[in-house]
Amino acid sequence: MSRTIEKRKEGLKGSYSVPGDKSISHRAVMLGAIAEGTTHISGFLNGADCNSTIGCFRAMGVDIDYEGGTDVTVHGVGLHGLKAPASVLDCGNSGTTTRIMAGLLSGQPFASVLTGDPSIQKRPMKRIIEPLRLMGADIRSERDNGYAPLCISPEHLKGISYGSPVASAQVKSCLLMAAMYAEGATTVYEPVLSRNHTELMLQALGADIGYGRDKETGRSYASLTPGHVLHACDIKVPGDISSAAYLMGAALTVPGSDILIRNVGVNPTRDGIIKVFKQMGGRIELLDTRVEAGEAVADIHVSGSDLTGCRISGDIIPTLIDELPLIAVVASSASGTTVIKDAAELKVKESDRIALVTKDLKAMGADITATDDGFIINASGEPMPLHGAAIEDALDHRIAMSFAVAALTADGATEIAHPECVSVSYPGFFEDLIPDSDIS
Ligand code: S3P
């Protein structure tokens, strides 16, 4: 059932906590499953995507104590302890599960098939199929169209040196997973550094992994030499900056807001949203910045601000790729022009986010033009340019949440078509964003 959101009468106030980081939650289960010993995960994201990952590992015989809260205990089976699943592995809506698991499964002595919902069956998989085949993997797209279902059969893997054309943590992590089962070292280069949670966690578990920037070419790399057992350790998952972003966007744009978002992961490969909001004039402060289990964490103080447009392109893009729909929304109520470039990847996320954001923001009265690799938004700031509209979200959680934020400052009612899709990454989102009295 759709959800109607009215303009917010008062600013957001008080202290918030957001659910656990999606990327780290996935990796904690995946690496915990193939580690020796028991992994206790706290702060786990009890969202549909991470639950798909748990389902896949349970289907491969891993004993996981989890009843849907934020604490998970994974009883690791070691690198060679996974069992053949009895049926197709269902990754739901999760591209991260599909791609990273494909690397892991390529190194197993049993055959498997990976698939997911209709959206997953349209996400590009050639980006992992091609390099996995270079490693010797037997992986193919069942319908030979470059999409899931992916059929994987046992094969001997060898380490490779691979330059990925896209800056993608999913591609990098997929190859690092396969690398643990290969003969010889694997090095993955990427044009721009993508999120590095896999590297940090592998290092914490004792893998032989190196990463950094290649001095000659300037490209980022991660390199894994197999042969090391992973030793389980407890993992504390920080709040997801990609979820905190919606609260930040709401607090910046709804006048009179003043909030504190506690315990948010601010890993420098993910914190582009903070840099961009600050560049736009947003009043944002990081408090009590600390490092927990190798990941930077902080409390974030955000207040209502007068924002101006900005230009976003190049190396910062992978650090805020999931936040770009929200940035487009926030830019529509700033003053001046915002130009977003180098973000063609948006077309192959859970939906074509360039097309959908443009369509929905136009429906709300914004002046936005789609380009091949981003958007141009012209906004005047005053008076609030947006008005309510019926929002098409294509069941894409980030579109639904971004437009819920837009609705808070738009005149009239905004209708989000599939509010339930936010459960992929932020169950409880609407309760956090909208006070009880305003829910209709
Ligand atoms: C993710 C990586 C990103 C991001 C996705 C989660 C991950 O995708 O968009 O939501 O956990 O590795 P790409 O690495 O493909 O850009």
Image (tube, rainbow, N blue to C red):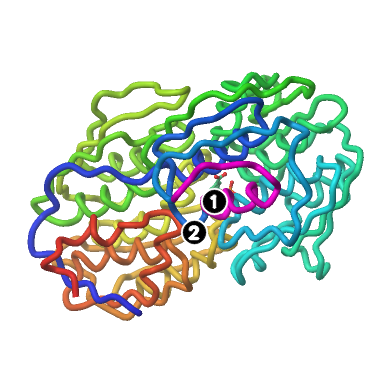
Relative image position of residue 114 (x, y in whole percent): 72, 58
Marks 2/1 in contact by CB < 8 Å: the verdict is yes
Other residues around mark 1 within 10 Å, as few (<14) / some (14–19) / many (≥20): some
Can you tell which mark lies on residue 250? none
**Residue beneath the point at 41% across and 55% down:** 339
Which residue carries the number 1 mark?
A: 342
Amino acid type for the residue under numbered disc 2: Gly
**Residue beneath the point at 27% across and 62% down:** 430
- Residue closer to the observer: 57 or 378: 57
Which residue carries the number 2 mark?
A: 374
Say whether residue 2 is visible. Answer: yes
Q: Is residue 78 above or below residue 245?
A: above
Number of marks in the image? Answer: 2
Helix, strand or loop at disc 2? strand
Q: In which quarter of the image is residue 29?
A: top right
* Magenta residues, start to end: 50-67
Relative image position of residue 234 (x, y in whole percent): 49, 26
Q: In this view, does 23 lie to the left or right of 257?
A: right
Q: Is residue 181 left or right of residue 27?
A: right
Amino acid type for the residue under numbered disc 1: Asp
N-term-proximal mark, 2 vs 1: 1
Other residues around mark 2 within 10 Å, as few (<14) / some (14–19) / many (≥20): many
**Residue beneath the point at 84% across and 52% down:** 111
- Residue closer to the observer: 238 or 175: 238
Q: In which quarter of the image is the N terminus?
A: bottom left
